[in-house]
Image (cartoon, rainbow, N blue to C red):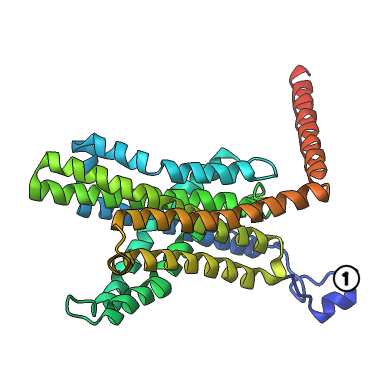
Amino acid sequence: MSAERDPVQRASGGDEDLYDVATWEPRTALDRLSSWLYGSIVTSARAGVVVLAVLIVLAQFAAALGLVFVDRPVVALYVLLSVVPALGMAAFVWKADATKREPLELLVVTFAFGFLFAGFAAVLNTVFSGLFLGSVTADAPLWITVLAPALYYFLIVGPVEETVKWLAIRLYAFRSDRFDAVVDGAVYGAVAGLGFATIENAIYIGREVVLAAGAAGSTAAIDVGLQTAAVRTLAGPGHVIYSAFAGYYLGLAKFNPDDAGPIVVKGLVIAAVIHATYNTVVTNLGVLTDTLGVAPGLAFIGFVVVYDGALFYVLYRKLVAYRAAYERTGAGRLDEAASRSEEDATYLVSDLDAGDDRQ
């Protein structure tokens, strides 16, 4: 929201010193200490979130995967190959950005946060899974086997996973001056989704390899890992698409602060709903394939291609609309002028520094 002003502030017009009466800025030692404490608390809180995420991910890997990536390096290769389509989709969104390219530092940090914050989602999903899925048993009625997972996906999995990916953008890149356009949110959202998809694929593939190795031996485990990687190859791009939508609306919120809250919520609702819809349909594909007599694998591939393709087209049209507005309004020329001014200022500082060195 835009800053509101006290009646005394408005009436004075800035002509009177109202420090500690109706206005405030750090002047005294206590003021400066208060500012420092506030900054320290905020910074520590952000650092604490990251440290907690790291600990959760390490615990996940230790408990579920052990040393699978060390003992069987080919499994790590499967993970890398499984995220290639998601990487390609994120790269497309990055390329479609009509404005200045985003700095590598912000992209790397956002990817890392998307990777790490997946641990928060895993914990929350696990905590609530029993509440929703406990009634899904072998002899449960069909409506329960369909409705219970759907509620779980729409009320827990979709909102939780899209929120942690949103947090991966909000915690660092969003606060940077280089996040200077609405469309930048889509870029960082796509990268956060790529990070999330990477660790999710690693856990799924690694866990299946560990289970298969214990039951059928090393050779069978590698085959299972390859099969799981093939399935996860199709699952990864969805994370990029969903969080790109949420990221776009986060960018829209940054430059429309009076309505930032509703805009952020809109983006998260869109991302969570399309995410939960995907999960619900995939979970119930067995019912559909039995009814229609379609091979499960073919049905899965067909659904993912059509669903992700349709959503990606909607996202693409949004990026195209932004590019058209960017070019139509001449915003690109303003960006170029600003860049030249920054370069001129940099050269001026360099010349002054060089002059000081010669003196």
Q: In the picture shown, does residue 19 fall above or below 180?
A: below
Q: Judge from the rendering whether residue 56 lies leftward or rightward of residue 252; answer left or right.
A: left
Q: Residue at x 32, y 76 (%)?
A: 146
Q: Residue at x 79, y 41 (%)?
A: 338
* Position in image of residue 48 (x %, y %): 42, 58
Residue at mark 1: 16
- The foreground one among 79 and 199 is 79
Q: Residue at x 29, y 57 (%)?
A: 295
The quadrant in which the N terminus is found is: bottom right
- The foreground one among 342 and 246 is 246
Can residue 67 be seen at all in this image of the molecule?
no
Three-letter code, disc 1: Glu
Q: Residue at x 25, y 39 (%)?
A: 75
**Tag count in the figure?**
1
The quadrant in which the C terminus is found is: top right
- Label 1 residue SS: loop
Q: In the picture shown, does residue 144 fall above or below 18?
A: below
* Position in image of residue 328 (x %, y %): 82, 49
Q: Judge from the rendering whether residue 225 lies leftward or rightward of residue 124; answer left or right.
A: left
- The foreground one among 95 and 262 is 95
* Position in image of residue 149 (x %, y %): 33, 73
